[in-house]
Image (tube, rainbow, N blue to C red):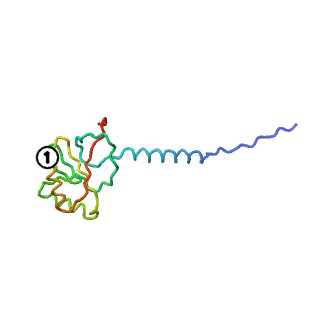
């Protein structure tokens, strides 16, 4: 009686399931990164609102801090230099919405002054940044 020798099978790494896992992870991280986007500005205590704000294309962000400091895209400015800096930042996209990110403790008169200076250089669209109620 002859005994047949088994042929040794070579081990193989199956790549198709690994590709499936990689694509699943890619989609997961893409979707989760979209949920983590926030306004790219200086942190301030925004007023609360009950409505959900729309997502805006954020080219120019005006920030007014509680201490009265005014910033254009994180660059500190004075009321006198606000128009110049804002005009420079809006040069490429003149029709963009300017997002006004003002702390809830800021004097209302300062907000009006900042908006007036922005209107003087041709800004016509403003969006007021708020925080949804219950969020912190």
The residue shown at (24%, 41%) is 47
Left or right: where does residue 40 sit relative to residue 114? right
Quarter of the image containing the C terminus?
top left
Give residue 36's position: percent from left, percent from top.
37, 44
The residue shown at (15%, 46%) is 108
- 62 vs 104: above or below: below
Pick whichever, 100 or 72, lies toward us.
100
Q: Quadrant of residue 21?
A: top right
Give residue 15's position: percent from left, percent from top.
59, 48
- Residue furthest to the right: 1
- 110 vs 136: above or below: below
The residue shown at (42%, 44%) is 32
Task: Please give the residue where the numbered disc 1 appears in the rendered image.
Answer: 68
The residue shown at (21%, 49%) is 63
Pick whichever, 72 or 53, lies toward us.
53
Left or right: where does residue 54 sit relative to residue 32? left
How many neighbours does mark 1 have within 10 angstroms: few (below 14), some (14-19), or many (20 or more)? some
Quarter of the image containing the N terminus?
top right
Marks counted in the figure total 1
- Residue furthest to the left: 80
Give residue 59's position: percent from left, percent from top.
29, 56
């Amino acid at each position: 009686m002859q005994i047949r020798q088994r042929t040794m099978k070579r081990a193989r790494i199956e790549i198709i399931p690994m590709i499936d896992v990689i694509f699943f992870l890619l989609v997961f991280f893409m979707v989760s990164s979209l949920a983590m986007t926030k306004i790219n500005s200086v942190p301030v205590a925004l007023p609360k609102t009950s409505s959900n704000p729309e997502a805006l294309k954020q080219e120019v962000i005006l920030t007014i801090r509680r201490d009265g400091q005014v910033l254009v895209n994180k660059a500190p400015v004075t009321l006198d230099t606000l128009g110049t800096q804002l005009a420079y930042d809006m040069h490429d996209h003149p029709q963009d919405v300017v997002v006004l990110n003002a702390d809830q403790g800021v004097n209302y008169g300062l907000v009006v002054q900042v908006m007036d200076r922005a209107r003087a250089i041709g800004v016509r669209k403003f969006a007021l940044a708020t925080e949804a109620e219950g969020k912190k």
